[in-house]
Image (cartoon, rainbow, N blue to C red):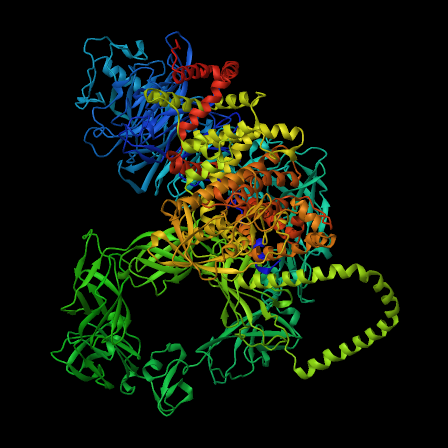
Amino acid sequence: MSPWAWMFCALAAFCLGFKPGADGYDEFTSATNLLHLAIDDTTEQVYVGAVNFLYQLTPDLQEEKKAATGPERDHPKCVPPIKTSTCSNAVPTQNYNKLLLIDKDRKRLVICGNIFKGICSLRQLNDISAIEYENVNGGEATFVASNQSTVGLITLMNNTKNELKPVMFVGKSFETYANAIVSTRTLSENEQGHLFELVQDSSAVKPDSHLQYRHDFKFSFEDGNFVYFLFSRTDGAQEEPTTYISRICISDVFYFSYIEMVLKCDDCNLVQAAYISHPGEKLAQHMNRSGLYGTVTSQDKVLFAVFNRGNLKTTSSDKSAFCMFSLKQINEKIEEYREICYSSKEMKEKNEIIYNPYKSDGSHNCPKDLNKGQAKAYPCSGEHLPYPIASREGIAATPLQHYDTNLSAIAVTVENDHTIGFLGNIKGEIHKVFLDNETDDYQTVYMTPNSKVNSDLIFNAKRDHLYVMTEKKITRLPVEECNSYKSCNSCIASRDPYCGWCVIEGICSRKMHCTKAAQKDHWLWSLNKQCPTVIHADPQNMSRNAPAPVQLNIEPFPALTDQDQIQCSVNNFKGFSLKHSTGYVLCEAPPINQIAATPPGQDYIDIEVNLKIVSGGKTIDFTRTNYSFYDCNAAMTLSPNIPCDSCVRSKWTCHWDISEHTCKDGHTKGDQLNIVQSKMAQNCPRFENALPLLIPVNETANISFHGKNLNFYQNKKLVIVDNLVRKTLGVNRNPPDMFWSENFKFSYDENETRIVHFVVQAEGKIIDSKLDVTLYNCGYSHKDCSLCLSANKTYECIWCKTLKRCVYKRHCDDVIDMTDQCPFPTISQLDPINGPLEGGILLTIKGSNLGTSSDDIREIKVGNAVCNQVAEQYSISVRVVCELNNVSNSQHNFVHIQLKNNKNGTSKSRFAYIDPNPTHITPVQGINAGGTSLTISGENLNIGRQEDVKVMLDDIPCTLMAFNESLICITGPLNGTVKSGDKKCTVFVHYGKFTKKAIENYHFDYVPNPVIHDVYPQRSIYSGGRNITVTGQGFNAVQKRIMKVKVMENGQLVEKNETEALQNSNNSMLIFPSPPANQKNVCIFVILDNFNENRTFEYVEDPVFECFKNDVFVLKQPPILIKGKCLNAAMTPEEVKAYIGTEECKVTTLSVKDFVCTPPEKQPAPKRVKRDANDDLPEFVVKMGFREYCLGKVKYDTPAQLPLGLILPLVLIPMLLIIGVSIYCYRRKSQQAEREYKKIQLQLESLEESVRDRCKKEFTDLVTEMEDHSNDLNDVGIPFLDYKTYTDRVFFLPSKDGENDVMITGKLDIPEARRHSVEIALNQFSNLLNSKSFLIDFIHTLESQKDFSAREKVYFASLLTIALHGKLEYYTDIMRTLLLELMEQYVAKNPKLMLRRCETVVERMLSNWMSICLYQFLKDTAGEPLYKLFKGLKHQVEKGPVDAELKKAKYTLNDTGLLGEDVEYHVLTLNVIAQEDVGESMPVKVLSCDSITQVKEKILDQVYRNVPFSQRPALDSVVLEWRPGSTGQILSDLDVTSERDGKWRRLNTLRHYNVRDFSTLILVRSSHAQQPDDHQQIIHGEKSGLLEEDRRWHLVRPADEVDESKSKRGSMKEKERTKAITEIYLTRLLSVKGTLQQFVDNFFQSILSTNQFIPTAVKYYFDFLDEQARKNEINDEETIHIWKTNSLPLRFWVNILKNPHFIFDVKVNEVVDASLSVIAQTLMDACTKTEYKLSRDSPSNKLLYAREISTYKKMVEDYYRGIRQLVQVSDQDMNTHLAEVSRAHTDKLNTMVALHQLYQYTNKYYDEIINALEEDQAAQKMQLSVRLQQIAAALENKTTDL
């Protein structure tokens, strides 16, 4: 197998499926928007209404069923049913699900959409694809849903017969065509069999104008005898809507009881979602305590609702609220308002609050003559009372919580008497809220970013999961995740009211999941904020050197059984408690050697004590605490200068032993000598009170100090040591307690001061010493005289004239000790060095001796201009700051400073007054959001300091970023005064307080912000670098173009990486490399200056490549194929670059696992040079975005070129050796060989001559053939048949009537007078066929008839295909149903036999279905290689002789059609002139042995090569005229010149007529042929005689038909030579096969490769077979393989391959047909898993492709495997595809003819079909037999009483 073929066979597609979401939740994703959600509490199945689809899901959101509901042809102004005649403007319309309700008692689903005026249908609850009821002819009474908002519920109502019947209450927005806003609908059939009609016209609840009353229904519910609706609407011309709740009695069909009342939630007026539930006991108590809700118990109901602030057109994104209302209080209020109206008290406090909400004048009609108590007497009102009514007042609730985003959904539940709410918002977030005295938003779950949470927020039956639906995703969210908290502390910290710590089990769980939760302190609720904690230890601590038992008191402490034990563990020491009881545990301390060492710098170690409960063989963590083991030895080291003090002051019980100089544990007796007791630090021996406290450097000094409690050291020698130079000095004593040290002198210049610690030692041991003095250096920081004299007076620093530095006063004799004596001030630096003429900026003067305070400065001048000192910024001696005054012109002056002591200082440099002149700006426009980098150019712009300069665009600041010769600033956002359009701003540059420079002649224009339309693709690899295109408008006005990625961390968006736009961007398109990221779901921010917009984006893991084996890839033949994982998840082949060294390897294929590229022809040079064994090999690098993969090196496997001098010895020497050995062996065997040779020599002589000639001829033919095949096919269009002709030929051409079949001709023999009535009846018959019950019974009945033959089944199925072509989705459903029945039969017997033959209707339906679904695939993909194969084969066959009578050819693939004789011939080139071409000749290649008919065929093929076959002249309609001279001759197959041999006549050939090369022939229409009449008569006479007696032959006379006379004359030798060795010609089969091999491979590749488009139908059907195999527990892969093979390759591709004229407008002759059959047989062999054992007796056809069969088998297996791995095709996608096919082609088919032909079967088996329908209960219910009788009467022109 060639590498190319192997490469394409190896490719496989990727597979995506449903999987848990990012957080491990079950998810379902839809291609269209999801709208409604419902859950069956019994089965927990999930039902979803979406745009154009319905879904039936398992509880874990796996798809079970899917049904398409749209798009359908519709128009808002048309009334269903939609017909072209009545609704010409109908267009395909998306079907938005508006209502999805479960009728649980009757196990059905109510579905309403927006199309067809909102009609509804019923579907089976266990199979949503099964429609129980649907009627588009019901009229306005059945128009249910609204295009806007619709809510509803199902309940029971007593009808007029007092029977409980199901009804549906519906609330919807007003539509012009609609009936009432609130209505009651029937859910049981009426007398006409209709559903969804109004129980009673409720026109009272219908506004006068939909413009005046705009409703937005959000929620409905039932309680007791009432139904409630929650909605918002406007009142009259009011723009701001108000939220209302309305109530109706269930039994009130006339809506007498209808009333509305206002509900308010702070200033949020727009209700978004609601939930009705019982409150928990705790919440009910809180509601009672608050006094806001009336009396509430846990048995009452509460309405929880979320509100936004805004109007119906827009909603605010910054505020929403969450409120609750007591339903009891709502009903009390409603009754109050009813009584106000009914008792004529509508004027409440002079404000009319009762009105009719659906009258434009708001009139109320409240009666004035009724007694009180009417509301109580008539709970459901009555006809005599006013209706409908509404109140302008209602209940105003206090929000439980406010939010800064729009809420959109709510669900509430109760757990352990506590109430918990789940709130969804438009950002795709779920807030978990605990409702008690205070509302606690304890957790936020992030679902789908920026995707609104749908209001259908539903719990499952157990209420342990919540189904959250966003725009295109449903997530099964657990209400709690207690088990994720692994410790008690994390469990309690979660604040999740569901969770608590189950102590005895050591888990965080719900209370119901904790075994002993009912017992005290066994389940600790998280909101009690308490874990088992050690509250006290006795003793509280202990010495590490004296461990003892410790009692740990614990709260809370669960009661334990006698079998339970508590284990105390410290480090590796584990032991059971010595004793435990409720409240405490007595633990044994660990041994000393198991207590860890005391850490440095501490005098104790905290050891974690772990307490575990051992119960039932399990060890559970109970609690833990830190227990302190102290170490007195370590306590003395904490303050090494005062060891005794450090010891006894520690918090432990440590005492100091003076004699041993150690810190000891425990207590000692009070009178013990030399012991300082714990906490008695005043008794420690110590030295303190050192003097002097200040010591200058380089000054000889000593210190004196006091000593206390020194009795023990009375006679011991004392020394003192410092910590600076560590010098030991002697200590002198002046009894009783005074001491002083020897003299010392310190040098130190590292800092101004340094603390020096002195300690007194005795025998090398430190006695407590608090002897600290400060060493100071006057000259360290006081660098000038003024600074020196301003130093701390206690330092006694003076300025030394001679040394010119600051020193201690004793170190200099010539001193300055007054500031007036200091040198003159000096100025060393000016900042800035220039300023504007107007002044107003600060000048900083730096230098020395600038005074000791700001008061010392008398005057500062710049030239003659005074500079006013800013005293607050003065720094002693070194800095003075002043504010410049204005000057009249530009100047450069020195700066002068004068002190109060009249000493002056002058700067060395000049300060410049300069006038700045800004003149230009670039750019001249920027976006309104700001962020434009504005460059200002001009003269002298960088004067002053940057902080003195300010740029303004009118009143908009521009932040200065660069301060050089040009100024650069960033524009601020345009303020709100200009809402749209451009704004021109003058640019001002401010210098200091007084200078303001306007840039004349230039304005900066603010232009609208850019608009982003789309961002694509929306996926990248983690490493980034994929080109992301942003389309929109207004990008040219933007300078900074950045794409930044932000990821969610701890609930916050955190900025990560960013990239800049590429250079090839323009005003409407930006291209960014995707920034690197490390998370899947992120937000991408497109930042354009200060404008930014975020988009959701997905990242996938980087692809993984397999590196080269041994780091080197040996390239033997291109291409290069590399395996990997997830290669094309976020990359296309065009985006990937591959390099071999310095040259590119062109990427051709990129699939999930395969990467293919075409390398350069020659090995490129390496790009990098490395010092290894393969230095000269180029590296193979794949670049994906920013990621580069170096997979190794590439070595081209080129043949080694050895020098000739080396080749000759290597070849000649072995040859000489072989020759020598051969001669020796020959001489040994020669005698024996000679004897054997003589025996067979005679046998071979006769055969040798024949074989020699034939082999030489065949070899020559083979070589010539392979060389001449360079000119393959002309580049002309492919003559595809149109869809109708294609289906006619596939379905009906094989029928008994062939091309004359009525389905092909389309002609029905129906009298014109009856044609209209017949068409009407056939349409009714079509409707009947669309009843699944009828059609299934119809098919079953026909198949059960014994005389219903297999041919009739095939024909019937084809008729059915055409009849149902308009509803291919329905056709597919029928086919699936029948296939399932067929499977059931075969699975019980032998599943491998299924679909092997076409013996049933469904098998032919499957063939037709495949033909329909693969037509476009044939045209787009497989048609071209098939056509090339056909043309190539025809070309090959016609290159050699073809016997026109025997139908055998020299070049063929079929051994039975092989011409077994040598026929002499040569190729002729004829110049052919077609009569209509006015003399222009065309060269045509023919053979001298061709019959005249064959010549005509070749000429027609060439002359009309661009014309489809059906449009060419018929063969019999043209003749060939040869004009060798002045007269012409008509050429024909037989004429008077034909050779005759007895009864045998030979067909005339070109050789017979002696037509030479380059002869001219004229192609003439037969009616224009010029020939004598007698010649015509001769020809006719000859033909007449031939038909009666003569036999014809062309090239070879049949061997068994040789005349006896000739046979007798011939010798036996001639007979033997005539037979010859026919097998020698089999080499021609191999020649043709080799020539056509590439065409065959290409065709097989086109139909058996997953590296290209896979037809939707193939994937869908194969998945169906896989699914049924799993359901029927068929694990045998061979069986599934057989099913697929029988369904697709054998049922479709073999048929198309053997019959190219089914898809192309061509003629297939017998020889080509025979060869195509060989290729078709090869395809069949490739699809079987059975291994065929070849032998010498095997048929030549089997042997011909024996080598390739294994390759083709693998191709088939890879194809099946690859399809299995593809993304699953949903029912929705399949139905969409089928609907497109129906729409595109149905109107071209002979549907009426098909219906008429189908009815003939109905007529033939009429009684049997009627009986079957009457026995079927479902058919009886739908009266199918009656309908069929009516149709029969109409079609047969009979009268009937039906």
Which of these two is toward me, 1210 or 1303? 1303
Residue 156 position, x and y percent, is 41, 16
Of the pair 205 and 791, the residue shown nearer to us:
205
Name the side, left or right, on which 1450 lies relative to 1840.
right
Question: In which image quadrant can residue 301 be found?
Answer: top left
Residue furthest to the front: 1574
Tell me which residue sits at (49%, 15%) in the image: 1810
List x then y, in percent, for residue 55: 46, 33
Q: Is residue 621 above or below residue 112?
A: below
In the displayed image of the protein, which residue is found farthest to the bottom?
Answer: 802
Which part of the image, by quadrant, shows the N terminus? Answer: bottom right
Q: Quadrant of the C terminus?
A: top left
| Residue 289 visible in this rendered orientation of the protein | no
Is residue 1807 visible from the viewing direction of this image?
yes
- Seen as rendered, the residue at the extreme top is 161
Q: Within the image, what quadrant is residue 1772 found in?
A: top left
Relative horizontal placement of residue 1298, taking residue 88 as reference (left or right): right
Q: Is residue 1237 above or below residue 432?
A: below
Q: Residue at x 15, y 79 (%)?
A: 865
x and y percent of residue 1404 in the render?
53, 32
